[in-house]
Image (cartoon, rainbow, N blue to C red):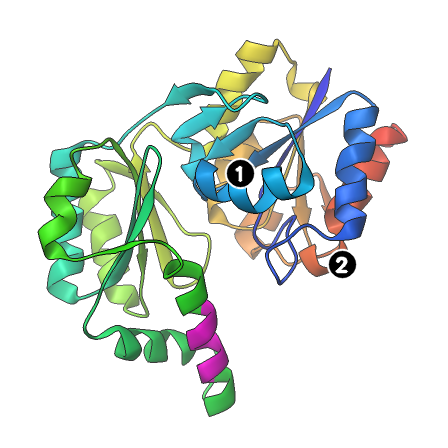
Amino acid sequence: MKIVFSDLDKTLLNDEHFISDKNLLAIHDLLNHHVKVCFATGRSYNNIKKLLLDKYDLHIPVISLNGAQIYLEDGSLLRKEPLNKDDAKNIIQICERQKLIYVLSTQNKTYTRRLNNLMDNLYHLGKMKSDDINMILKGMQIYYDIFYHYPTFDEQNIDEILQNDLYKIEIVTHKKQVLDIIKEQYSDKFYMASSADANLEINNINVNKGNAIKYLKNYYHITDNDMYAIGDNDNDLEMLQCVGHPIVVSNATHKVKQKAEIMVSSYDNDGFSELAKMIINHDI
């Protein structure tokens, strides 16, 4: 048996955050050739199920929240690694002091912090990539749509949320120095990685996509040579390092490209479908 682990955003999904017709056909071609496909993502399982699995009628395993949770084809939870709540509260306090956008992911729900200075945060995020006002406004809308389709909470709700297991904190900010301070001070407490320029994803110290893949390797009894992984950003590094065939899309970061055996086309040119064709034709 072979298995392909695929990151989602900027790897498999298009700019509308859905699976293109060509990549969807590639997934089905792999499955029809008895090659498993597993999504490996920083997103929550509920988000993936609603927007992708149910939409495309896919019954595949999922590594969610960067490996904090592993779900099987039938939707059952195989493994979970929550955050230490006391340590997590320290990060939350920093976010509160700095008035940052941040997202909390529990077992079944994801919440976004409701902020009084939201427009200011969104403006500076949009300005990171352009000084053109139209591009800034477009960026502000994109960030808002990504994070504020989740239920919001305020400071009074934090303790209520933390009554449940917490699996990931995601911070979104233009204040790179704040993210650098968090990484420096808490590197021994958490696994921390970025999937975009303006974010920091924080998980249990034992959590990363690579460790989740190692767990599934033993569960499915697969060899390294029968495992493929495709990604684009820093939170994919461990995933690429623990499979026999690490693949990157051409829009991947330089750091990630250095880990690749093969580079395929960018996410918006259906690079995943190129990988699927190579596997089916036994070219890799």
Residue 57 at x, y = what percent? Answer: 67, 35
| Residue closest to the eye, 134 or 98 | 134
Part of the protein shown in magenta? 136-142
128 over 157 or under it: above or below: below
Please indicate whether residue 86 sits to the left or right of residue 65 in the image. Answer: left
Question: Callout 1: few (<14), some (14-19), or many (20+) C-alpha neighbours within 10 Å?
Answer: some
As shown in the figure, which amino acid type bears the numbered disc 1? Lys
Q: Mark 1 falls on what kind of element?
A: helix
Instruction: Say if residue 229 shows up in the picture.
Output: yes
Residue 217 lies in quadrant: top right
Question: Callout 2: few (<14), some (14-19), or many (20+) C-alpha neighbours within 10 Å?
Answer: some
The residue identified by callout 1 is 49
Residue 189 lies in quadrant: top left
Residue 20 at x, y = what percent? Answer: 73, 53
Residue 10 shown in magenta: no
The span from disc 2 to disc 1 (Cα, nearest Å) is: 24 Å
The residue identified by callout 2 is 269
Location of the C terminus (image quadrant):
top right
Q: Which mark is residue 102?
A: none
263 over 64 or under it: above or below: below
| Residue closest to the eye, 116 or 269 | 116
Extreme residue toward the right, this view: 281
As shown in the figure, which amino acid type bears the numbered disc 2? Asn
